[in-house]
Image (tube, rainbow, N blue to C red):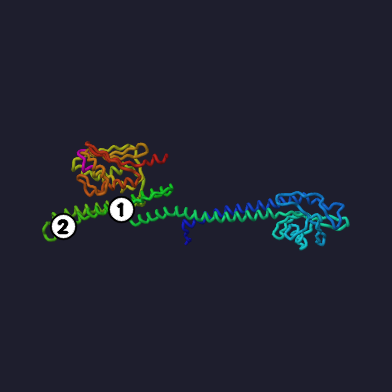
């Protein structure tokens, strides 16, 4: 398993690494530029003087400069005369050579043969604590002796400047790195603190505590995350309350027929009721119980958003007709008629016939219960949607009833167990549709609105 790192450590590491990388690049670039400047300056100065040789009237034991050599910011160009045996001839115009002078350091380097007498090019020499560049030109004295002119320039001042500035940069880099670590630690703490708070909030939700998080965050992203988590918490809280209410109501609804069955069975057992009276009641309650259990199972499946529905492309007109035919005997018994307002062309939709049929049956059952003379079923297409209308000519319903109509286990006037219409809403929602209710003194209309697949194909 990959080792996990804390967010604070990661932020500190990234900030420190970035600052360190930037300073290393600056430090390296600075040293390269200064070194390049020192070398190019020395090379330029020595190149201008390397063509100067020993004047024709120069004696073996006396050398004098022919002209003053150019100066550069690092220092002036000087020269020594050296024999092929590395004997240094110090010109008499030089002041007394001390051990701390650049001339002494170069003279010592020559005598130790640390300087090559090969002609051509500019070479680097580190002697003592100084930095020098030199070039060698071969010449001849009046006596015919081979001499080598060692032209050199002392670049120690620039070299010392480079070292001092490098040390200063290193000091600045160290201070900046320390400040970065401190500021990074504070910044990381500022980032990690709300993340930890959100983590605690998420843990609370997992443990069933759905109270809102009241903390405010100044960062937009964290504020948006908190808002989403609060909304999720509200949904989970409502879902839990709905589930609790659902199971309380379900247990009550299941207990009622079971108690009736039990009491009739006990009365039958002790002879308080005759079989002819007890058995029909028990059978009716068993049917009621079975219907209720089926509805609860269907609701559970829809709540779980099961994807195993066997959908196929079918004609909604045929499904509505088949659903209404199951109520024909009841319609005849109550003296009701059904009027169909269907288009001539098929109205295709992809669905599982069993679930949508169940929704239509619940709507029809509700219409049969409250209709006075007629029920109207209609299907139409408009504006990229399919409209299915189930309408009765009953007395209508109160506004308070209409608002609670789709709540689970809410029983309206003459209602049964109160989950029929909630099943309708869940089924329609599973197909990305919605249901609306219009009610007045002339009756009630349930309008199912589904997305039209034919229109969707052209989008």
**Quadrant of the snapshot with the C terminus:** top left
Among the 4 quarters of the image, the one containing residue 101: bottom right
Q: Which mark is residue 263?
A: 2
Q: Which mark is residue 279?
A: none
Q: Residues within 10 Å of mark 1 (few under 14, many from 20)?
A: some
Q: Nearer the viewer, residue 34 or 250?
A: 34
Image coordinates of residue 124 in percent, x first then y, are 72, 56
Q: Residues within 10 Å of mark 2 (few under 14, many from 20)?
A: some
**Measured along the vertical axis of the image, is residue 269 above or below residue 449?**
below
Question: Which residue, given by chain and number where applicable, does mark 1 sit on?
Answer: 240
- Residue at image point 34% right, 51% down: 212
Q: How far is mark 1 from mark 2, CA to CA? A: 34 Å
Q: Which residues are magenta?
A: 367-376
Image coordinates of residue 435 in percent, x first then y, are 30, 42
Q: Residue furthest bottom?
A: 112
Q: Which numbered disc, 1 or 2, marks the residue closer to the eye?
A: 1
The tag earlier along the polypeptide, 1 or 2, is 1
- Residue at image point 30% right, 53% down: 240
Q: Is residue 285 visible?
A: yes
Helix or strand or loop: what does disc 2 sit on?
Answer: helix
Q: From the viewer's perspective, tell me whether residue 441 is left or right of residue 57.
A: left
Among the 4 quarters of the image, the one containing residue 453: top left
Q: Is residue 372 magenta?
A: yes
Q: Nearer the viewer, residue 86 or 307?
A: 86
- Residue at image point 47% right, 54% down: 186
Q: From the viewer's perspective, tell me whether residue 452 is left or right of residue 290.
A: right
Image coordinates of residue 349 in percent, x first then y, are 35, 43
Q: Is residue 298 visible?
A: no
Q: Nearer the viewer, residue 77 or 378?
A: 77
**Measured along the vertical axis of the image, is residue 419 above or below residue 393?**
below
Image coordinates of residue 296 in percent, x first then y, are 27, 52
């Amino acid at each position: 398993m990959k080792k996990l790192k804390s967010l604070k450590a990661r932020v500190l590491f990234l900030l420190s690494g970035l600052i360190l990388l930037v300073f290393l690049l600056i430090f390296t670039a600075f040293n390269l530029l200064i070194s390049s400047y020192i070398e190019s300056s020395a090379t330029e100065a020595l190149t201008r003087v390397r063509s100067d040789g020993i004047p024709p009237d120069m004696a073996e034991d006396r050398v004098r400069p022919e002209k003053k050599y150019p100066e550069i910011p690092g220092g002036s160009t000087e020269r020594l005369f050296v024999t092929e045996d590395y004997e240094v001839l110090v010109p008499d115009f030089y002041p007394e050579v001390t051990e701390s002078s650049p001339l002494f350091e170069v003279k010592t380097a020559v005598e130790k043969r640390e300087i090559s007498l090969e002609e051509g090019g500019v070479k680097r020499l580190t002697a003592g604590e100084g930095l020098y560049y030199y070039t060698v030109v071969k010449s001849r004295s009046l006596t015919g002796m081979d001499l080598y002119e060692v032209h050199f320039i002392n670049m120690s001042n620039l070299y010392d400047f480079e070292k001092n500035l490098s040390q200063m940069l290193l000091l600045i880099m160290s201070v900046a790195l320390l400040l970065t670590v401190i500021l990074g630690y504070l910044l990381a703490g500022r980032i990690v603190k709300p993340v930890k708070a959100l983590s605690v909030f998420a843990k609370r939700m997992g443990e069933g505590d759905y109270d809102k998080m009241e903390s405010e965050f100044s960062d937009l992203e964290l504020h948006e995350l908190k808002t989403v988590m609060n909304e999720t918490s509200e949904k989970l809280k409502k879902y839990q309350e709905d589930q609790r209410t659902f199971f309380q109501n379900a247990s009550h609804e299941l207990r009622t027929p079971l108690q009736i069955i039990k009491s009739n069975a006990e009365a039958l057992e002790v002879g308080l009721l005759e079989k002819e009276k007890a058995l029909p009641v028990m059978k009716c309650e068993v049917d009621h119980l079975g219907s209720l259990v089926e509805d609860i199972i269907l609701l559970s499946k829809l709540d779980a958003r099961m994807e195993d529905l066997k959908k196929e492309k079918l004609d909604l007109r045929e499904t509505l007709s088949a659903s209404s035919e199951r109520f024909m005997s009841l319609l005849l018994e109550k003296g009701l008629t059904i009027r169909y307002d269907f288009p001539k062309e098929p109205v295709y939709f992809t669905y599982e016939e069993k679930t949508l049929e169940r929704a239509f049956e619940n709507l029809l059952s509700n219409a049969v219960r409250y209709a006075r003379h007629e029920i109207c079923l209609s299907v139409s297409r408009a504006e990229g949607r399919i409209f299915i209308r189930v309408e009765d000519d009953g007395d209508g319903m109160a506004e308070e009833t209409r608002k609670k109509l789709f709540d689970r286990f809410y029983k309206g006037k003459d209602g049964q167990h109160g989950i029929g219409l909630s099943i309708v809403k869940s089924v329609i929602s599973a197909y990305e549709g919605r249901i609306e209710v219009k009610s007045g003194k002339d009756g009630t209309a349930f309008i199912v609105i589904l997305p039209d697949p034919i229109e969707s194909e052209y989008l």
